Image: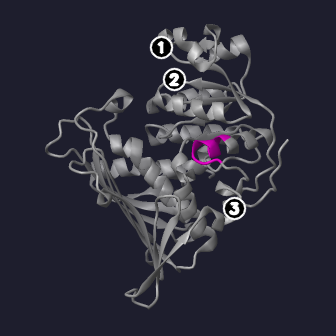
Amino acid sequence: MSKSNPKDNKSGVVWSEKTSATKSVVIIGMGSQANSWLGCVKKHPDYKLTGIVDIDTEMMEHMNIYGLAEEDFFISIDDYVQDKGKPDLAIIATPIESHHVLCKETMDHGINVICEKNMASTIYAGRQMVQCALDHPELTTSVGQQYRYFIHNYLCHCYIQEHNELGDLAMIRMASGGNWGEKRKGWRRFLPEVYLEDMMPHWFDLLRYWTGLDIVQVKCDTFIPRYSQWQGSSTAFVSLALAHPDDYNHRHNWVWAQIYGDWQSRGPNTSEKNFQKLYFAKGELKVGGSWLEITKYNDEQGKESEEDGFLLSDSGNDGVEHMGTDYDGQMIIMEQVKRCIDSGGKDQPLNAFPKIFKSFAVSMAAIESSRSGKNVWVPDYWKDLNI
């Protein structure tokens, strides 16, 4: 058994020591996202794939690809449990609209769950998932918001939460533009707000993760560019306000953010289409790459400045979220889930359903805003939930 010193990760969790007890894993929905999770299961020494659940029975002929036999394939989690017993973990990587039902069916068996993002297709379905997690505190839940654990995003979080020398954060600007052409492949072609439902949830979650604040107000416009033949919106302009719970009603203390997101951005994929920058009283942060770019102002107006940087070693040299591993991205989720299972549900992952709901709610608020043309007050979505 390898050990890492328990350490407060500044996010409210003191991680228990790392153990090596193997956990059995079933993947539900064997599409492209599932293959990414499959790679993590194979890479993590404390997990073992024991089954596949999918309604496409033709996949049974290819089970050897996953190192399994045909008898390890099932069309429902009920059938798996009846035949092989209860696995330790189910990873649900099906289309978004099925997440809430499959999560409940799986958790009703007493099985721990990782659910792909976006959490659900409606705010009501997401609330049901949160309630299910609250009703089963002994189980581990997590949502696949892995972008927060990429090195550059963790560095931004760590700098702001633990090392900030730039003073008060005031504004954030983000842009992400890519060209998917005229085709929307797979399950994404059925999403009416494809960027808001599939990609933008990562950006909303990063705003919360970087700053430690809640997104309280959203104004969003989504549209299909005049040259596009898509049937669902590919482009979003979003303005947001972030605040600590004590400042929900103190507008002067809000942090403002602006996001442009696009999957039909034409022309060269230049750096101007993809940037993430945070503006403070005494400087700026530019997020991206293997280190954090810092601009420190040398005068009160910020006209004179000097450049600096922030590396992973500057964060304490004990890995992402101080977990004592060399993991990032989805592997951090896998490690947090495993430690929570070992704790009997005590050490819930930072991506647990009740914790990630406030990120998910923003995407639902943005959709509501784009259809109503009005600002949406996001805390109304969770005001009566115990989260």
- Residue 260: x and y in percent read 32, 56
Q: Secondary structure at mark 1?
A: loop
Q: Earlier in the sequence, mark 1 or mark 2?
A: 2
Q: Quadrant of the N terminus?
A: top right
Q: Earlier in the sequence, mark 2 or mark 3?
A: 2
Which mark lies nearer to you, 2 or 3?
3
> Magenta region: which residues?
327-334
Q: Determine which residue is flagged by label 1.
A: 56
Which mark lies nearer to you, 1 or 3?
3
Give the residue displayed 45% in from the left and 33% down from the top.
96
Q: Is residue 55 above or below residue 232?
A: above
Q: Determine which residue is flagged by label 3.
A: 317
| Amino acid at the residue labelled 2 | Met
Q: Is residue 303 above or below residue 132?
A: below
Q: Earlier in the sequence, mark 1 or mark 3?
A: 1
Q: Residues within 10 Å of mark 1 (few under 14, many from 20)?
A: few
Give the residue displayed 80% in from the left and 43% down from the top.
343
CB under 8 Å between callouts 1 and 2? Answer: yes
In this picture, residue 92 sits left or right of residue 374: right
Q: Residue furthest left?
A: 227
Q: Secondary structure at mark 3?
A: loop
Q: Secondary structure at mark 2?
A: loop
**Which numbered marker is on residue 30?**
2
Q: Is residue 75 above or below residue 164?
A: above
Q: CA distance from mark 2 to mark 3?
A: 36 Å
Residue 379 visible (yes or no): no
Give the residue displayed 81% in from the left and 49% down from the top.
17
| Amino acid at the residue labelled 1 | Asp
